[in-house]
Amino acid sequence: MKQDLIVILDLGSTQNTVIAREIRDLGVYSEIHPHDITAEELKAFDNVKGIILNGGENRVVDGQSVEIREEIYELGIPMLSIDYPQSKCQEQLNELPKEETLKKFIFETCGAEANWNMKNFIEDQVELIRQQVGDRKVLLALSGGVDSSVVAAMLIKAIGQQLVCVHVNHGLMRKNESESVIKVFRDELHANLVYVDAVERFLGKLENVADPEQKRKIIGGEFIRVFEEEARKLEGIDFLGQGTIYPDIIESGTKTAKMVKSHHNVGGLPEDLKFELVEPLKQLFKDEVRACGVELGLPHDMVYRQPFPGPGLGVRCLGAITRDRLEAVRESDAILREEFAKAGLDKKVWQYFTVVPDFKSVGMKNNARVFEYMVIIRAINTIDAMTASVEKVDWDVLETITNRILSEVENVNRVCYDMSPKPPATIEFE
């Protein structure tokens, strides 16, 4: 079913995503496009019901005011102008529209229908994937993270065994994560899954490496090499599936906004591996990706898992990674997640995890002196990840977690709670 579309043209606003989300929340699909889009490009969508010219403080770039092409006014599509003095629209606002104003424009002026929902989105994407792929094969790096898991479920629904998933266990996963990936995708969804046990390979490369950036580079580079080796073993692969989502595209920069961060998923593959990309989630925000995963039948724990750094527990085992500390991080993290879930904090706290530093402290166990590691607990809340506040966890919950870690995790004699907000601290330690 072709969904009605409201196009937001970026004319220097910092609120493009806010308005796009508000429109989608009203049940109408919206997309953000650059100010200099052509009339032909807009016509190609064939379901554009309205256009919002969204101006703002960045509407002057290199001394020049950004403007839309004159031909856009001649399309006959209803238009609403926000904070854009050069506008020739009949409807003009000097600030962000209130909900009632937005509703009136979308449903009365544009005549759009509230037909944007996950069921329709999935049906559309499944059809588009089948048209793009045909009878050929798609390769996907399946980490078990939210984005790659939802892409995998979508591709399985669309093309079944034509999808080849590669899951690389680098030994830096959280407890039982690889087992969960195998259970869900191979056993339940019957995916064509290649499991690569590369634990010894990764830990060998990381031996005695203490610098955080060097660790990240080794983990990222080695992953690409392992994935490349597996790709070369396979025949008839023409496509590479990726979990690109809408914020990735927006953060990569627009013509009126600076790049927040460069975006890549499985970047750095050799040029002779000539894959065409399949990116079915590239127009979804993160919460919409999760809703898509639920609609596709993925387990709640997988869809709502927390943000997890690309290098995994490698950056939570501080300094040079040792197997005993890596295991202490993995086991203490599992206890923390289990107790937070029992207390209902898993639905309240944005991110929580444990780290183990590379030094020991004196303690007592079984009436004997011990020299063991400490576990540091971090639990923070944030809206945009630019700033973060510390969660005030109930003392009884912290005491339960502490007692369990001290009794169940080997080589640990001390538990600390990190009270540092961001800034001056960062979310992760490394």
Image: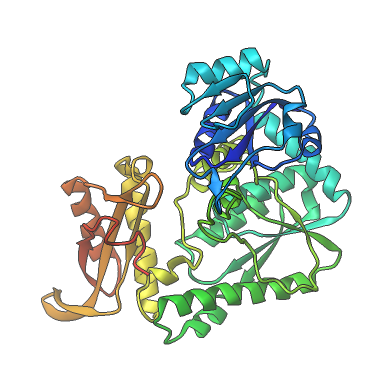
Residue 5: x and y in percent read 69, 28
Residue 167: x and y in percent read 63, 63
Residue 205: x and y in percent read 52, 84
- Residue 63 to residue 68: above or below: below
Is 62 on the left-hand or right-hand side of 211? right
Is 400 on the left-hand or right-hand side of 133? left
Is 338 on the left-hand or right-hand side of 286? left
Q: Is residue 117 visible?
A: no
> Residue at the location (47% across, 42% down)?
57
Residue farthest to the left?
Answer: 367
> Residue at the location (47% across, 49% down)?
305
Task: Looking at the picture, tell me which residue is in the foreground, 178 or 137.
Answer: 137
Is 46 on the left-hand or right-hand side of 380? right
Residue farthest to the front?
Answer: 63
> Residue at the location (54% across, 56% down)?
259
How many numbered callouts? 0
Residue farthest to the top?
Answer: 108
- Residue 243 to residue 235: above or below: above
Residue farthest to the bottom?
Answer: 208
> Residue at the location (70% across, 36% down)?
122
- Residue 65 to residue 330: above or below: above
Q: Is residue 66 visible?
A: yes
Task: Looking at the picture, tell me which residue is in the foreground, 292 or 271.
Answer: 271
User: On the rendered image, what quadrant is the C terminus found in?
Assistant: bottom left
